[in-house]
Amino acid sequence: MKRQDCLELDRNDPLAATRSAFELPSDIIYLDGNSLGAAPRAVWPRLERLVQKEWGEGLIRSWNEAGWFTLPSRVGDKLAPLLGARPGQVVAADSTSINLYKALVAALKLRPGRARVIGDAANFPTDLYLLQAAIEAVGERRLEHLEAEAIATAVDDDTAVVALSHVDYRSGRLHDMAAITAAAHAAGALTVWDLAHSAGAVALALDDDGADFAVGCGYKFLNGGPGAPAFLYVAERHQAEIEPALPGWMGHVAPFDFAPEYEPAPGITRNLCGTPPILSLAALEVALELWAEVDMAALRRKSQELGQLFIARIEAACAGRGLVLASPRDPEQRGSQVSFRHPEGYALVQALIGRGVIGDFRDPDILRFGFAPLYLRYVDVWDAVEQLSQVLDSGEWQQEAFKTRQAVT
Ligand SMILES: *Cc1c(COP(=O)(O)O)cnc(C)c1O
């Protein structure tokens, strides 16, 4: 493989054209689209029109006339095909953390009398905290953290819920949703999946895999913008039975009756809580339109090729420099990111950013690189590894400035 071959791969890439739909600085190689997706150009004119016309001129009338009121479920239905979900099962609302809490409490309440809850100790901190909080809210449950391999055989008729991230945020490891869900269902348990690092990164089939609940972020691979609303999927078969943990007025059957008693809306919208953030929802809606033409099989293939190229190049160009692969080598077992360990990981990532190659660092020693196939080129991967090898060779990462931890890593 040579740099020339990467340029050839880019010329033949069926996804090459989508790059131009994004605003990207020409001197940056962006390997952090798994943390904050790039900005779709179409968001600008949409937000301008929204602020000037819908808000500025339409004022409060726009809740009806500009369709603001139905935006959470409309955006949910736009997202549904990407998740492998039929319409009416997804809403865009709140943050991933909040949706996780709603999903966990709902799932636990659907399985009373079952004491075990199975999680993964390596899960993202917010998932760990909220699983604990949901268990405390519902009561009489006991949390067990298991290794992924052990879960399918451990689920039994005392298990209420299995709650996992589909793709591990540190290692990029991809769990087998179909197999784990089938094992949970065989024992009568439910599943709650966090798709933060899978939505827009891997082909998903929530309906076919039998998922019960799922949540995920709008601002990662979905490119909805910083703090974009998250999403919540509830399989249709559960919707009528859910007692929302956060029964806000936007989930009421008739919010504008201003009734003193809560009565849940039918269907997915009972999971809404308060007034939705219209500017952010509109940005996410526009960002989702980019996916209409995307073949998810082609996207997954490119994502895997970018990851394999990255691993192969690092192992060739940075051999003997202390980088150890922290992700599954088999692309079938990996999401759309590759991580390496290095004891000086933080400083290395900072030095790389200094050279215009943006990845990120996760405690204690993980250098994490995300591959967003909608806008990343093969040649970017090649060039990023060249820069990393120069960072290692030059020792420039040893400068004090690169070792000082910032608030966001
Ligand atoms: C990014 C991420 C989150 C973020 O949750 P927020 O509520 O958006 O801050 C949650 N879970 C996982 C697994 C993540 O990777």
Image (cartoon, rainbow, N blue to C red):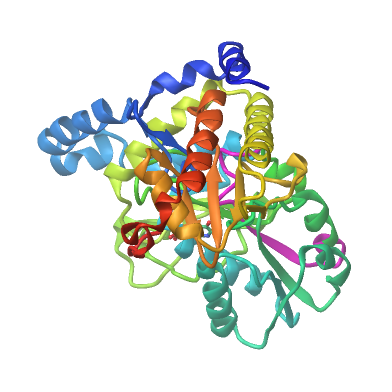
Image quadrant in which the N terminus is located: top right
Q: Quick check: is 199 in the magenta stretch?
A: yes
Quadrant location of residue 314? top right
232 or 258, which lies in front?
Answer: 232
Q: Does any portion of residue 16 appear in the rendered image?
A: yes
Q: Residue at x 56, y 77 (%)?
A: 134
Q: Quick check: is 8 in the magenta stretch?
A: no
Question: Does 311 appear above or below 380?
Answer: below
Q: Residue at x 37, y 38 (%)?
A: 356
Q: What is the span of residues highlighted in magenta in the rendered image?
A: 184-202
- The location of residue 265, given as percent across then percent down, is 47, 56
Q: Residue at x 64, y 68 (%)?
A: 122
Horizontal side of 278 relative to 170 (left or right) equals left
Judged from this view, the residue extending furthest toward the front is 394
Horizontal side of 262 relative to 259 (left or right) equals right
- The location of residue 387, given as percent across then percent down, is 47, 37
- The location of residue 189, given as percent across then percent down, is 77, 67
